Image (cartoon, rainbow, N blue to C red):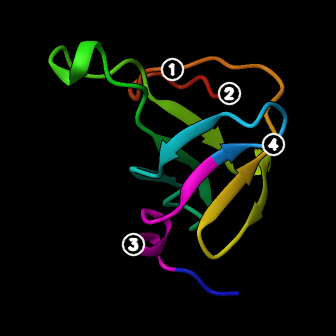
């Protein structure tokens, strides 16, 4: 299966451990050296009706992706921890 990064942005991310719907892919972390995808970035939930921005983003490492389907991306994450984009720690 081939997929463009633009196609990933149209897919919803769902955690298969607890059924949590994280949202849609917003960005992708790439390794420039070897051309691998390192992680998917999903924006965090909106704060108070979206007036005060969003909470920290979800950064999902590529190794945590269980399946990529036509409409959704299933991930397998036991613990939830949100990180800011500029930090190097992942889920």
Label pair 1/4, CB-CB below 8 angstroms = no
Q: Residues within 10 Å of mark 3 (few under 14, many from 20)?
A: few
Q: Which residue is mark 4?
A: 16
Q: Residues within 10 Å of mark 2 (few under 14, many from 20)?
A: some
Q: Residues within 10 Å of mark 4 (few under 14, many from 20)?
A: some
Nearer the camera: disc 3 or disc 4: 4
Instruction: Give the quarter of the figure containing the N terminus.
Output: bottom right
Mark 4: secondary structure: loop
Q: Position of residue 68 (x, y in %)?
A: 71, 67
Q: CA distance from mark 1 to mark 2?
A: 8 Å
Horizontal side, residue 70 vs residue 11: left or right? right
Q: Nearer the viewer, residue 84 or 74?
A: 74
Q: Which residue is mark 2?
A: 91
Mark 2: secondary structure: loop
Q: Position of residue 34 (x, y in %)?
A: 61, 65
**How many numbered marks are there?**
4
Q: Return the mark for residue 69.
A: none
Q: Which residue is mark 1?
A: 83
């Amino acid at each position: 299966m081939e997929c463009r990064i633009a196609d990933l942005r149209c897919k919803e991310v769902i955690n298969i451990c607890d059924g949590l719907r994280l949202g849609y892919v917003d960005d992708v972390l790439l390794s420039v050296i070897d051309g691998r995808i390192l992680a998917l970035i999903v924006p965090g939930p909106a704060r108070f009706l979206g007036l005060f921005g969003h909470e920290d983003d979800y950064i999902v490492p590529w190794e945590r992706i269980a399946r990529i389907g036509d409409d959704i991306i299933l991930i397998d994450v036991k613990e939830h921890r949100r990180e800011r984009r500029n930090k190097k720690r992942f889920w």
